[in-house]
Amino acid sequence: MNKVVANADEAIGDVFDGATIMVGGFGLCGMPENLIRALQRRGTKNLTTISNNVGVDGLGMGLLLANGQIVRHIGTYVGENKLLEQMVINLQIDLQLIPQGTFSERMRAAGAGIAAFYTPTGYGTVVAEGKETREFDGRPYLMERALKADFAFVKAWKGDKWGNLVYRKTARNFNPMMATAAKVTIAEVEHLVEVGELEPDLIHTPSVYVQRI
C-alpha cells in the first residue's frame, strides 16, 4: 500500500484541536520540521505535546509554542527556550517533566501493549507523588503508566512507499518508540525510495506502524 501523500499540509490534515501529539527529536536533531511548520500554518490549538523538549525560541516546536497552540507538554528537558520558561512561570502552560529513561520506556510500553511497569527511578522524589509504589527484592519501585498519543510525528533518513523507515545516527533518538505508541504515525523522510530498496535487516520502524509519509 502506497502511503505517500502530496505534502506535509495534507499529511497533518486530520489533526484536531485538543489532540495529543508525540514529536520526535533530541534538541533540534531528528525533529520533523516540515510537519511542525504545517501544524503551525494550520493553527490547530489546545494541543498536548509529548517530546524530549519544546524546540528553541523560533525553531522546531518553539514555533507552536509562540503561536499559542500548546497548552500542555510532557517531556524531559526545558532548557534553551526562554519563551517556555516564561510561560511556565506565568502558569500559561501545563508542564510535566519525566526522567528521560522513564520517558522512553513509557512510550515503548505503549507500543508493546503494556499498561504499566515498575521502575526505581524517581522513588522518594516529587516524581513519585500520587503513584503506586511496591518493593521488589528489598528495593522500592514506583509504577509508571504507558504513554500514548493520538498522533506521532517522526523524522527518518530513508523511507519506502509502504512506510518502512531507517533513521540515521543521533536522529534516531525517540522516533522509533513514538512510531509505535500513537494511533496515527506520520513520517517525514529525507529520502523516499521504492519498496525493496531498503535492506530488511536494517529497517528500524516496520511499515505496520506508519500510516502516512
Image (tube, rainbow, N blue to C red):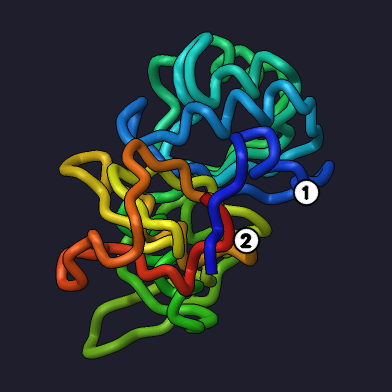
* Quarter placement of the N terminus: bottom right
Q: Which residue is mark 2?
A: 184
Image position, residue 128 (x, y; %): 48, 60
Residue type marked 2: Val
Looking at this rendering, what residue extends furthest in the right direction? 17
Image position, residue 146 (x, y; %): 52, 70
Image position, residue 59 (x, y; %): 48, 15
At x 36% / y 26%, what residue is drawn? 28
Instruction: Decide: is 66 above or below 115.
Output: above
Residue type marked 1: Asp
Between the C-alphas of marks 2 and 1, the distance is 10 Å
Q: For the image shown, how many numbered marks are present on the structure?
A: 2
In terms of sequence position, does the residue under pointer 2 or pointer 1 come before the other? 1
Q: Which residue is mark 1?
A: 14
Check whether the beta carbons of the residues at disc 2 and disc 1 lie within 8 A of each other.
yes
Question: What label sits on residue 125 in the rendered view?
Answer: none
